[in-house]
Amino acid sequence: MSDEPILFQNTMQITEGHLDGFRQAIQSAIEFVGQHGPQDMVQVFIDEEQMIAHSFQLYGNSEAILKHWELSDPYIQGVMEHCTVKEFTVYGQPSDAVMDGMTGGDIEFDFTMVPRFTGFSRLPGAKT
């Protein structure tokens, strides 16, 4: 279960007047995880008109998510100063430890779980 890929989709409502701060915080977080994080992919899209951002993060397994949380907590907190989670979807079947972190963290939000059925990835080193 925890050795399967897991995709996070996070839709964030950017706080009015915080677009520049949000952009700076996200950029700083992405630069950090690009160098140190375990994600296989991170992409962020911003709809400035609606003040909504969409983040997609692909992890190889649950252990990668736990490592990301350990390394990136200050960056996550910095981003959250400028937004609220509007919708969060977990695609895959994370471990109990990840599920505990999703429900017992400092930032509370509802999320939806969608179990993986099948698929493949062309990312280097990705499991099918």
Image: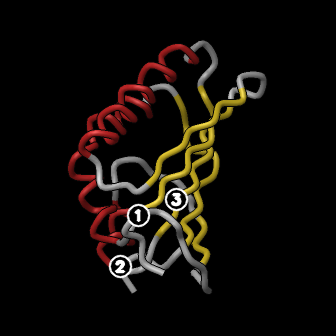
Residue 81: x and y, percent?
43, 27
SS for tag 1?
loop
- The disc at residue 36 is none
Q: Is residue 82 above or below residue 73?
A: above
* Amino acid type at mark 3: Phe
Screen quadrant of the N terminus: bottom left
Q: Is residue 56 above or below residue 82?
A: below
Q: Which residue is mark 2?
A: 95
Crowding at dot 2, Cα within 10 Å, few <14 / some 14-19 / many 20+, comes out as: some
Q: Which residue is mark 3?
A: 8
Residue in view at x 57 percent, y 81 percent: 116
Residue 36 appears left or right of 106:
left
SS for tag 2?
loop
Mark closest to the chain's N terminus, 2 or 1: 2
Residue in view at x 42 percent, y 77 percent: 127
Q: Nearer the viewer, residue 35 or 89?
A: 35
SS for tag 3?
strand
Residue 15 appears left or right of 26:
right
Q: Which residue is mark 1?
A: 124
* Amino acid type at mark 2: Ser
Crowding at dot 3, Cα within 10 Å, few <14 / some 14-19 / many 20+, comes out as: some
Distance, label 3 to label 1, CA atoms, is 19 Å
Q: Is residue 89 above or below residue 69?
A: below
Q: Is residue 74 above or below residue 103?
A: above
In the rendered image, which quarter is residue 91 located in? bottom right
Residue 67: x and y, percent?
24, 58
* Amino acid type at mark 1: Pro
